[in-house]
Image (cartoon, rainbow, N blue to C red):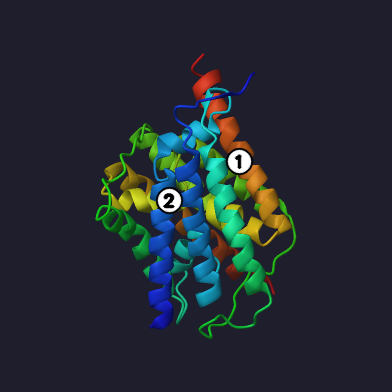
Amino acid sequence: MTVGIDWNAFTPWSALAGGVLIGTAAGMLVLLNGRIAGISGVVGGLLRPAHGDIAWRAAFVIGLLAAPIVYALFAAGPALQIDASYAMLVIAGLLVGIGTRYGAGCTSGHGVCGISRLSPRSLVATAVFMAAGFATVLVLRHLLAA
Amino acid sequence: MRLTLTSLLAGLVFGLGLIVSGMANPAKVLGFLDLAGAWDPSLALVMAGAIAVGSIAFAAAGRRTHSLIGAEMKLPSARHIDRRLVLGSTLFGIGWGLAGFCPGPALVALGLGEIKALVFVAAMLMGMGAFEWLEHRKRAAASLSA
């Protein structure tokens, strides 16, 4: 197996710029609210409502949902390509929902915030979900399709 | 009120980062996870940009007992690497590889009005709800036997 980079798809500058925005947002939430910008944790906490702990979570989610509307004020909206079937989306959603809660984090909480804090737990979690993601795509696109 | 506004702003900047970086698009995420295909390394640069900024913010946050606007700092204190962390992250990674959605991008795609994102988010919330239900049952059983 050789890794060949798709130079046409690779968008280094927008990827870095978007990453800086994501890091800035995580920095804002920790320095202003004292909280971790982990999306699965923020959303999951809404399902276990505690007094005084709902507003900031709901506001963060509203910010995420509103981002495309604000983006559209400055540029043409991004075109998304979602190839997964509805059945696949349901299975994927269930796995992501239960997995991120058991694993206490996702790409943002472990991958961005946790690694920024040099948390050994987050380094392990990120390595594990990345490996599982690579393996899943390998099976779906190459082993089953072959 | 102030904490709700700062959280809303952080969520918005986070969402804009996901759009600018291209990570709101599942096809682009799957391009990263497809090591054996035409590989798109963009996601690695998103992480690098986010962690570069995040590291500075978390280094500053780690020394504080209260946030810049007086909120209590609530950073994770767990340090153990256990089966829950590894199994949960494995399930998450599989779900991520099946559809190319993790929680943040799915919410941004929902904000774009994508019906497929709605299906994914609904299933994800059900998965998170299942986790809460199982945890609640476990706590109830533990308190009965105590």
Q: Residue at x 56, y 19 (%)?
A: A143
- The quarter holding residue B66 reads bottom right
Where's residue B21, x and y in %? 44, 46
Where's residue A126, x and y in %? 63, 48
The residue pinned by badge 2 equals B18
**What kind of element bears circle 2?**
helix
The chain letter under disc 1 is A
Near-viewer residue (A9 or A136) = A9
- The quarter holding residue A58 reads bottom left
Q: Residue at x 26, y 45 (%)?
A: A76
| Labels 2, 1: one chain | no
> What amino acid is labelled 2 in the image?
Leu
Above or below, A27 against A53 in this view is: above
Q: Residue at x 47, y 50 (%)?
A: A17
Where's residue A4, x and y in %? 57, 22
Near-viewer residue (A107 or A146) = A107
Above or below, B71 against A123 in this view is: below
Dot label at residue A130: 1
Above or below, A57 against B118 in this view is: below
